[in-house]
Image (tube, helix red, strand yellow):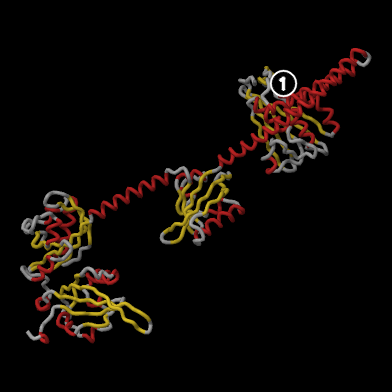
Amino acid sequence: MDQQTEKTDYVYTVLNSKGKILYVSANAEEFIRSGREELIGRYLSDYVHSEDVQAVESYLQNQHYMFPCSFRMKTKENGSVWAEAVMDFIRSHKEAGEREEIVLKITFSDPEDALSNPSTLLDEGTAEKMFLNHLPSPLIITVKGVIHFANKEAVALLKAGANDARLIGLNSLELIQEDYKEIFRNRIERLQKGARAGVTEQIWHRLDGTPIELEVKTSSIQYGKEHAELVVLLDISARKRFQKILQKSRERYQRLIQNSLDTIAVIHNDKWVFINESGVRLFRASGYQDMLGKSYTRFMKEDQLIHAQTLIREVLTGQSDSRVGEVEWKTYENQLIFTEMVCIPTSYFGEPAVQVILRDLTEKKKTEELMLQSEKLSVAGQLAAGIAHEIRNPLTAIKGFLQLMKTKDTSNDEYFKIVFGELDRIELILSELLVLAKPQTSMFTKTNLNLLIHEVTTLLETQANLNGVYIKTSLTNENSNLYGDPNQLKQVFINLIKNAIDAMPNGGSVKINTSGSSDEIVVTVQDEGEGISESILKRMGDPFFTTKEKGTGLGLMITYKIIENHFGKVTIASEKGKGTTFTICFPTKGGRSVR
């Protein structure tokens, strides 16, 4: 045959990267009845069957030059013809720079037959069936559900052996799991009426009985003289297994987050958009509704806010992959909590966000404070032991010489009695100082607290009057007996009353009240001084901390120690300009002997 008159079943076309036709061979009109002038400048997708446009665009976009793409092209008679395209590339060097163009070799399947009978896709025994038989996707054609054709991929997928003999004539419903049969039956009815049917996922059974998960695409076609169904099968078993693995992994990850002892949260646009159960408990919230959608800034003070915003901003702007810092927060109960905050970048619906991990350091902080307090007590104890030892040595000499003087001079017995009483008092105070250094043997006996307070107030009444202070007592008539060391308890109330007197340089009154029950005795010591600020209240009882010009800071510390040794509890309430109240609770039963 002469080369000039040889008829080919393919055309060449050149497209730009967006799919616009730049060139097409002259024989295109033989297949789609459109001339070169009409085609050039148009997009290839304009001539592709609407159901295949997405497949062609994906093929061009992803540049599958190693694989062919099968699709239908429209003709002027509103028909279509099947085509297979193979891709290649050329590069053109223009003034604007290098650009990439796409060359497609489009092969058409028996175009004369397709154009002469555009309403018929397939006839039994036609070349189109041979074409479909070599498609890489499993495909079957059914008429009202009965299989009339299965390509090689479908035969292999359904384990039908070497050919399609076991499939032809078989009702496809017999291959479908019971749960999906009614769905497939309804799809067949819709396709028989010319309606469209979308994509669905179903479980089929191969001929050997093994199940297989499939994505099923169906469309209505003409097969011979009958309305038929074109069924494309995609094995998604591996995808489903992977999805199940991902789902299990996601569920484990979610359980890990929800059961984490640390708070894990996400902040987006300065708001909590996710928080786990530990976070809800950390902020003492009643539920997630109290946290989600709320600004994180409402949970912290201004100085802490600046620090937290800096950490978050550095992560959001990409200055750092992660930031760690200590941040102080407020709970819904207005309590302060100390946390270590770790910020790492994440996304929330495609927008930049910050994942926050909060570790509660509140107990750690308290432990550190207790350790610091213990260290101070240790230092104070060592100092007190040294002071007591140094004072006792000269005190012993003084008492010895006074005793000698007393035996020689009996005319001043009254004065000697007073001096010896004061010296005994000094020795008692030195003994109290040793409470800080080491445990002392305390004599716990049944003690009447009302009587003990009366003795202390009598002792300090003269000093109070000299400072313009009046001591008022209101002692309970109920049982006021407890087990304790009278000398140590006297020291407690001496310290508290003296502090109250010192707090009122312009005079006032000290009110001492007791109330009792079968379980405890409550004592309050209230003054009318200037009051104590909150910052100072927190440090009351610390070793060497004092607000007095000549104070040592040991009096209240000794007082707290004695109360602790008596299983008691002490609280302080103060209001600026109105005074301070010490409240002490002693149990009435179960004292202990201290070694």
Q: Which quadrant would the N terminus be assigned to in this image?
A: bottom left
Question: Does residue 375 sit above or below 29 in this rendering?
Answer: above
Q: Is residue 105 above or below residue 288?
A: below
Label 1 Cα neighbours within 10 Å, binned few <14 / some 14-19 / many ≥20? some
Residue for point 82% across, 36% down: 507
* Residue 539 in the image, given as x and y percentages of width and height: 68, 39
Q: Nearer the viewer, residue 579 or 53?
A: 53
Residue 399 lies left or right of residue 268; in this view the side is: right
Residue 479 in sight from this viewpoint:
no
* Amino acid type at mark 1: Pro
Residue 252 appearing in the image:
yes
- Relative image position of residue 54 (x, y in whole percent): 26, 69
Q: Is residue 30 above or below residue 135?
A: below
**x, y (%) of residue 148?**
8, 62
Image position of 26 with respect to 516: above or below: below
Residue closest to the eye, 504 or 161:
161
Q: Quadrant of the C terminus?
A: top right
Which residue is tagged 1? 486
The tally of labels here is 1
Residue 134 at x, y = what percent? 13, 66
Label 1 secondary element: helix
